[in-house]
Image (cartoon, rainbow, N blue to C red):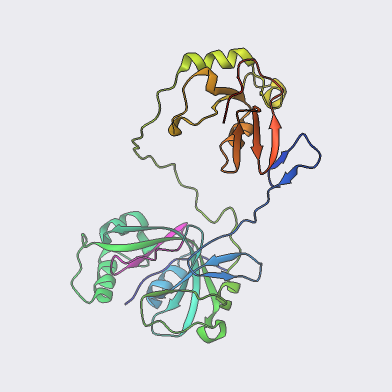
Amino acid sequence: MVPHAGHGSVSAPADRNRHADCLHYLERPLTFLLGGKSSTASGYEMTSVYASTSPTWFASLRALSITPTEVAFWRPSDVQAQRISAGEPWLFKEWGAPQLLGYGRYVEYETTTPSAIWERFGLASGAGSLADLVADITAARRKTTFGDTSIGNVVLSNFTTFDPPVPLTAVGLNNLPVPFRYVPEGSQALALVSPPSLDWAPPLPARRKELRSEVFARNTGHVAHVRKMYGGLCQVTGEPVLGGIGGNLTQIHHIDFLYQGGADHHSNMMSLSPDWHALAHAPSTKFDWAKLEFVVDGCRYGLRLNRHLEPRAS
């Protein structure tokens, strides 16, 4: 089968305990995950796909005077790679030849039609006209194709060419008996791919979608009461958020979570800074009602301000 391709050229947060022996820094490396994981020469891990690519499609895109922001790597059938994520490399393996032509970065997968691809991508579809695109897809599918035939499409950015093409044997890849495969762990193919940068994704208008959700109807009167009681001060730190330059930026936290049956009452509420509110919801955080202290990874943080909470059994 003849799939088709893309285009272009080559402190972590810290939680400070009041006690000197509890100073924790959480640090996680930024990792790009793609499918099967491989390590590049620059040290980050990714999963990548290499897919059969029409040399005609690739040559058409490469010949464009201006590299499109996005290209349509159309698929003869609606079969997609499930494990690849946005920003990860999609390598172009030339159909009928054991070599890599280049790569693009995965943006999204869509089920679409030839007419919709041409309307959205035009020459970035790798064809000179809608008729040419339909003819190319017909040849790949080996059955009659129309403008409204359902097919798949991989949207790619950062179309990049390898000059010269790279033999599969040079990077430890096998030839493709199927439309695509994940790059196996340990392959040198990803050493050819530049590390992802912040501009890999094209600037696109924000998309709208309709969401339906169910939320708790909060007791706004009790929330306002607690906010007024502490006047913009965090009960843990005893300080206003950012020194008070933005006014009262504290948030009201339900100590026993509402979704776990906690009361929507001021006796179950406290005034916290946004940082402490986020930490209060962290999986490792517990609240000791008997001592009115937060317990975070074994370290205890008491309240510097308390004008309404009563200790009770946890």
Question: Image point 70% across, 33% down: which residue?
Answer: 301
Q: Quadrant of the C terminus?
A: top right
Q: Quadrant of residue 127?
A: bottom left
For this rendering, which residue is in front, 22 or 131?
22
- Please tell me whether residue 173 is drawn above or below residue 131 in the rendered image: below
Q: Residue at x 57, y 69 (%)?
A: 193
Instruction: Evaluate whether residue 250 shows in this view.
Output: no
Q: Nearer the viewer, residue 45 or 115?
A: 45
Residue stretch rendered in magenta on the structure? 66-84
Q: Residue 305, percent across and down?
A: 69, 20
Residue located at (32% from left, 68% from top) = 75
Q: Is residue 230 left or right of residue 266?
A: right
Q: Among all residues in the image, which is located at the extreme front?
A: 313
- Compare residues 222 and 88 and report the one nearer the observer: 222
- Is the residue 185 above or below the residue 69 in the image? below
Residue at point 53%, 62% (across, down): 33
Location of residue 200 in the rendering, given as x and y in whole percent from the top left corner: 54, 56
Residue 150, by quadrant, is bottom left
